[in-house]
Image (cartoon, grey):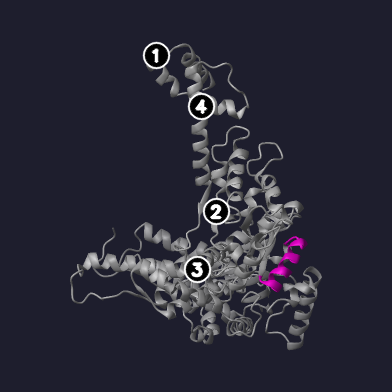
Amino acid sequence: MSSWSGLAFVVASAVTGSAVTLAASAFYDLYFQRSYAFDIMPPDLSPGSRYMYTRAQNNDKAERAITTCSVLSALDAGRADPVVGREDEIDRVVCILCRRTKNCAALVGAAGVGKTAIVEGLAQRIAAGNVPDALAGARILELDMGAVVAGTCWRGMFEERLKDAIKHVEEAGGKVILFIDELHMIVGAGDKGGPMDAANILKPALARGRIRCVGATTCEEYHRYIQTDAALERRFQKVVVEEPSVQGTITILKGLKQRYQEHHGLKIQDDALVAAAQLAARYITGRQFPDKAIDLIDEACSTAKVHFDKQKVENNIISSIFAPKELTVGPDHVAQVVSRCTRIPLTTLGQDEKEKLVHLAEKLHERVIGQDEAVNLVAQAVLRSRVGFGQSSRPIGSFLFLGPLGVGKTELAKALAERIFDNEKTLIRFDMSEYAESGSLSHLIGGPRSYEEDGQLTEKVKRSPYSVVLFDQVDKADPSIFKVFIQLLDDGTLTDGKGHVVDFKNTIIIMTSTLGAEHLTTRMGIENTVKAGRGLLMGQVLKRLKPELIDRLSEVVIFEPLSHDELKEILKIQMKDVIATVANKGVSLFINDAAQDVILSESYHLVSGARPMRRWVEKNVTTVLSNMLVNGEACEGSTISIDAADVNRGLRYHVLKKQGSTDP
């Protein structure tokens, strides 16, 4: 590029032909731009070259003016949405801007609380004349740091562009207020290995009060970038912007209602505004008011309008007298948007959960056989929490399930997920034996900022905030993890490795362990023996798990070994699945009590509970049935009967074919 521009310059100096002059003019801009960047003045110039040099200088000034305009853009007070409920913050900003020195404000708050809206509210006040004389007639110009940095390939270009913008503001004599959104971006912006970044260029003007400035940034970025530079921090007066309450958000939504009705061409019910605030507070975590409630209303209106227009086209009701004159958005439209965003079924979003809670224990017993005490303890704890007697800052419920293998601990967790959140897939399971080594905590919550790996636990709960989190065999985890669990159970939140807070208030936490299970006797024993066994079990648990962790749980639930009758009920449930699978092939299956007793006697194991029974059925029943279906021994219309064999305590299969049926 440099050789071409230099060649053009030489040719333009030596030749006077018009064609060559035109060719040279196509290259002058690049040449003189580079000459300016390196502070190199051209040598002795011919008259034609002097003309081109003067033209380049004039164009450079024009380009600077254009650049300044593109870097600074005015906030249009007329197009901004009404600002409601931020009078105190706007008053505070006005007071800061009217100071003689250090007249710069930094709006600090979480993303979505309305920091930019406060600046728009200030612009509206200025336009209405409701400000002190010092700010009367002032304009608010936004500094676009991206536009300042863009295209600054040579040293000095960035500094010159930013200084032009500062000069433009200074020459306005206090009638221009500079607004810097994402204030933290000025730290390091334009730094090409030297100290002159945007922050250091702005400091002199900010300190002497030559320009009025308002910046906006998040709390995290303020602490990370602004607060670490004491010289920069003292030039800004911090204004903390808090998240509004639910009632305050409803007031804000009512102020914005007319704008959204006009934009979407429909009517919004006040009940929809209330529903948006309440549902956002309960179901949308990790975001702030009023932003998340405004988004709900906006998307509910958009969804309703698109669906309505689609129906008009499909049903051709544009000119029909039955077509509604005005589309209305109500609470149901908002609930549909929440359901789609959070993947929570609409039935769960209903305000009345009485029926679900009243019959919770009964529904859990449909999947969990026996364990009456365990099921009732869990149901009662969830009931207390959902009614409001539990602490709102904690998870819905937190439980430690203790007992032998195969007695229903994991099954109860699955049943809870299905009943409370309407989907068994909302169960998030962690095998804590995989987190036994020191340093395993980083796998759960993520490593430090320098690591790219996200936490397995925190990321899954971010994606599915309404879930049952199962920590299986928790006693095998590294002890450092227990400290994090204490925070989780106490505050209902976890901070991941990158500093992001993850909300666990809408989860159910379940930990399982087989510690001390050998001390549990069957319920055929003496009552005192059972109590002694429980005492020994808890003593062993407390040696491994911290007492402060146990104290923060909703319940410690002990699962007893299953009796013969309960195992038989579990077998019936398992055989229902086998019967349903065979029925899909057009074959009927029957199994009598004698055959079930054979299965129980062959598969029962005191330590493993019901788990060996499923494996025995798969190996000795479903395998035989599969062979019979494949080799044609049992075909569509056949009936298979299973009973006990006379010898070796095995099973016997009888196949009765339907009359007229033939083998395939």
Residues in magenta, as a range: 477-492
Q: Nearer the viewer, residue 369 or 141?
A: 141
Q: Is residue 369 above or below residue 462?
A: below
How packed mark 3 is, by other alpha carbons closer than 10 Å (few <14, some 14-19, many 20 or more), is few
Tag 4 residue: 54
Q: Which residue is mark 2?
A: 142
State the CA–CA distance, disc 2 to disc 3: 20 Å
Sequence-wise first label, 4 or 1: 1
Mark 3 or mark 2, which is nearer the start of the sequence?
Answer: 3
Q: Which residue is mark 1?
A: 17
Mark 2 or mark 4, which has the lower sequence index? 4
Q: State the residue in front, 29 or 53.
A: 53
Label 2 or label 1, whichever lies nearer to me, is 1
- Residue at the far top: name it: 14
Q: Secondary structure at mark 3?
A: helix
Mark 4, other Cα within 10 Å: few <14 / some 14–19 / many ≥20: few
Describe the element under mark 2 as helix, strand or loop.
Answer: strand
What's the amino acid at mark 4? Thr
**Residue 293, placed above or below residue 137:** below
648 in relation to 34, above or below: below
Compare residues 47 and 478 and report the one nearer the observer.
47
Mark earlier in primary sequence (4, 3): 4
Residue 108 position in % (x across, y down): 65, 62
Distance between mark 4 and mark 1 Cα atoms = 19 Å
Q: Which residue is mark 3?
A: 128
Residue 317 screen position, x and y as percent: 20, 70
Residue 359: within the magenta? no
| Real-space Cα separation, disc 4 to disc 3, in angstroms | 46 Å
Query: Within 10 angstroms of label 2, few (less than 14), some, or many (20 or more) residues?
Result: many
Residue 533 visible? The answer is: yes
Q: Position of residue 161 (x, y in %)?
A: 58, 40
Q: Amino acid at mark 2?
A: Glu
